Amino acid sequence: MTAQPPDRILRLNTVLDRTGLSRATLYRKVAAGTFPRQIRIASRCMGWRESAIDEWLRNPMFYSVEDG
């Protein structure tokens, strides 16, 4: 059985580079629920789970955030 590597946390500039989105478009998509939400790393620091970004990249047209 192969152990999965831990999920990395990506910062904003890395997410923008990987997705090709502008900062404004990314935050608009987060607000609309069509892009993964950020997670809090520290009191003034946010990031995204790499697995969530990879999932969005596989099918950006039909991605939606699931509540829960």
Image (cartoon, helix red, strand yellow):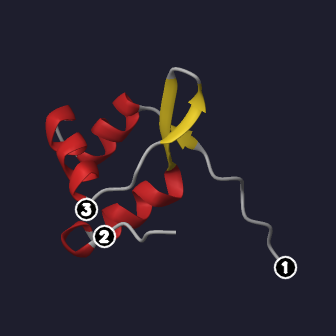
Label 2 belongs to which residue?
Answer: 64
Query: How far is mark 3 from mark 1, CA to CA?
Result: 34 Å
Q: Is residue 11 above or below residue 31?
A: above
Which amino acid type is marked by label 1? Answer: Met
Q: Which mark is residue 34?
A: 3
- The N terminus is located in which quarter? bottom right
Front disc: 3 or 1: 3
Query: How far is mark 2 from mark 3, CA to CA?
Result: 5 Å
Check disc 1: other Cα within 10 Å, few if <14, some if 14-19, many if 20+. few
Query: How far is mark 1 from mark 2, CA to CA?
Result: 31 Å
In the image, 47 versus 10, the foreground residue is: 47
Place residue 40 in its image quadrant.
top right
> How many circles with numbers are drawn on the protein?
3
* Left or right: 20, with 16 as reference point: left
Q: Is residue 25 above or below residue 53?
A: above
Say whether disc 3 or disc 1 marks the residue closer to the N-terminus: 1
Label 1 belongs to which residue?
Answer: 1
Q: Are marks 2 and 3 in contact (CB under 8 Å)?
A: yes
* Left or right: 41, with 46 as reference point: right
Secondary structure, mark 2, is: loop
Secondary structure, mark 3, is: loop
In the image, 19 versus 31, the foreground residue is: 31
Q: Is residue 59 above or below residue 39?
A: below
Residue at 29% in and 70% down: 63
Secondary structure, mark 1, is: loop
- As drawn, which residue projects farthest toward the front? 68
Residue at 58% in and 22% down: 43
Which amino acid type is marked by label 2? Answer: Ser
Say whether disc 2 or disc 3 marks the residue closer to the N-terminus: 3
| Picture coordinates of residue 15, whole percent (x, y) | 36, 40
* Left or right: 11, with 23 as reference point: right
